[in-house]
């Protein structure tokens, strides 16, 4: 817990993938094309690392194994700067599109590669597109069995591509030895509103995003989990032709303003790494099943048990 009168620390997280790997572009860009496309992630990571260093902030980088294989020096730069290296899987395939054996192979491959490059244990995992939900709850068993200690793979909102609006909003023990730390939502008028980054952060006025995070800190008494991608600070990235209007808007809206907004965000709140905020014995790992999370867990468990998924 923070000292009396001191604001909570929030978790700053970066999903390390490039513009052509986003799930919304999967119908337009075949995986076989990836190696032939201009990769801009390394230069964008340098800009992010410089910004974090200027603010004295340590963050968690959920990194694709595919990126780490091609840019090992970027991975080492992340670790050498004192940030946490965590897993985003290997090939940015949604967990919901893999069977248990395929999912195990994907997360095992990514974890081993990241640990070999960094020389340090990889404790965290975030599923591409927040793709763990009731239909593949078994994925948490696999994560625990493969040595992960926490996941940040559930977004408790209603969305056309992902979301689990009835799940707990804050960290909870999803199985012995493994906690789920959802990205942050604001509860307002009976609904969970996105308040933790991504396209919503680029679309909404900065003052509203700041207000939502502050409200979670002050009224819920919880650390927020914020996320963004390196391609979101890159307004000069190549435009993908032929994409539908919704994907075009979601991907490209306000790219020119994102870095400046993150700069302001880093100055407006206290930030830290996921492992340091949620894994210490005195942190959320022990308190995970208290408060709002504890109230939500029986409802979640009953629903999943009824559907035969527990």
Image: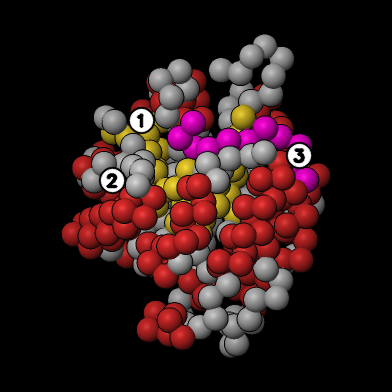
Separation (CA) of disc 3 from disc 2: 34 Å
Of residue 282 and residue 212, the one placed in the foreground of this image is 282
Q: Looking at the image, how many numbered discs can be counted on the residues?
A: 3
The overriding secondary structure of the stretch rendered in magenta is helix
At 71% from the left and 15% from the top, the residue drawn is 5
Badge 3 density bin: few <14, some 14–19, many ≥20, Cα 10 Å: few
Q: Is residue 193 visible?
A: no
- Callout 1: SS: strand
Vertical relation: 243 (above or below) 135: below
Does residue 98 appear left or right of residue 204 in this picture? left
Q: Nearer the viewer, mark 3 or mark 2?
A: 3
At 78% from the left and 45% from the top, the residue drawn is 264
Does residue 65 appear left or right of residue 11 in this picture? left
Badge 2 density bin: few <14, some 14–19, many ≥20, Cα 10 Å: many
Of residue 267 and residue 163, the one placed in the foreground of this image is 267
Comes first in the chain, label 1 or label 2:
2
Comes first in the chain, label 1 or label 3:
1
Comes first in the chain, label 3 or label 2:
2
Of residue 288 and residue 167, the one placed in the foreground of this image is 288
Q: Which mark is residue 173?
A: 1
Q: Which mark is residue 183?
A: none
Q: Is residue 87 visible?
A: yes
Classify residue 250 by image quadrant.
bottom right
Q: Which mark is residue 143?
A: 2
Classify residue 106 by image quadrant.
bottom left
Residue at label 3? Answer: 267
Residue 145 picture location, percent across and down? 21, 42
Vertical relation: 202 (above or below) 168: below
Q: Nearer the viewer, mark 1 or mark 3?
A: 3
- Callout 3: SS: helix
- Per the rendered image, the range of residues in magenta is 264-276
Which residue occupies the extreme left position in the image?
A: 101
């Amino acid at each position: 817990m923070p000292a009396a009168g001191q604001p909570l620390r929030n978790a700053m997280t970066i999903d390390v993938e490039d513009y052509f790997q986003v799930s919304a572009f999967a119908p337009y860009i075949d995986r076989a094309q990836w190696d032939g496309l201009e990769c801009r992630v390394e230069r964008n990571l340098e800009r992010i690392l410089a910004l974090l260093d200027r603010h004295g902030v340590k963050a968690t980088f959920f990194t694709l194994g595919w990126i780490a294989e091609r840019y090992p020096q970027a991975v080492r730069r992340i670790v050498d700067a004192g940030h946490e290296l965590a897993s985003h899987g290997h090939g940015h395939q949604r967990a919901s599109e893999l069977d248990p054996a395929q999912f195990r192979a994907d997360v095992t491959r990514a974890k081993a590669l990241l640990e070999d490059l960094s020389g340090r244990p990889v404790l965290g995992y975030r599923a591409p597109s927040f793709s763990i939900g009731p239909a593949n709850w078994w994925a948490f068993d696999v994560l625990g069995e493969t040595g992960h200690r926490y996941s940040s793979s559930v977004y408790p909102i209603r969305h056309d591509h992902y979301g689990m609006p009835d799940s707990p909003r804050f960290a909870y023990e999803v199985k012995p030895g493994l906690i789920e730390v959802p990205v942050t939502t604001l509860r307002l008028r009976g609904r969970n509103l996105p308040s933790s980054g991504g396209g919503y952060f680029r679309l909404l006025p900065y003052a509203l995003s700041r207000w939502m995070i502050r409200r979670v800190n002050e009224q819920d008494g919880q650390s927020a989990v914020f996320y963004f991608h390196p391609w979101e600070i890159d307004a000069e990235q190549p435009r993908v032709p032929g994409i539908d209007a919704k994907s075009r808007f979601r991907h490209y809206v306000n790219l020119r303003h994102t870095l400046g907004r993150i700069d302001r965000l880093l100055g407006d709140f206290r930030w830290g790494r996921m492992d340091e905020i949620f894994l210490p014995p005195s942190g959320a790992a022990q308190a995970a099943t208290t408060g709002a999370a504890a109230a939500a867990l029986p409802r979640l468990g009953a629903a999943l048990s009824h559907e035969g998924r527990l």
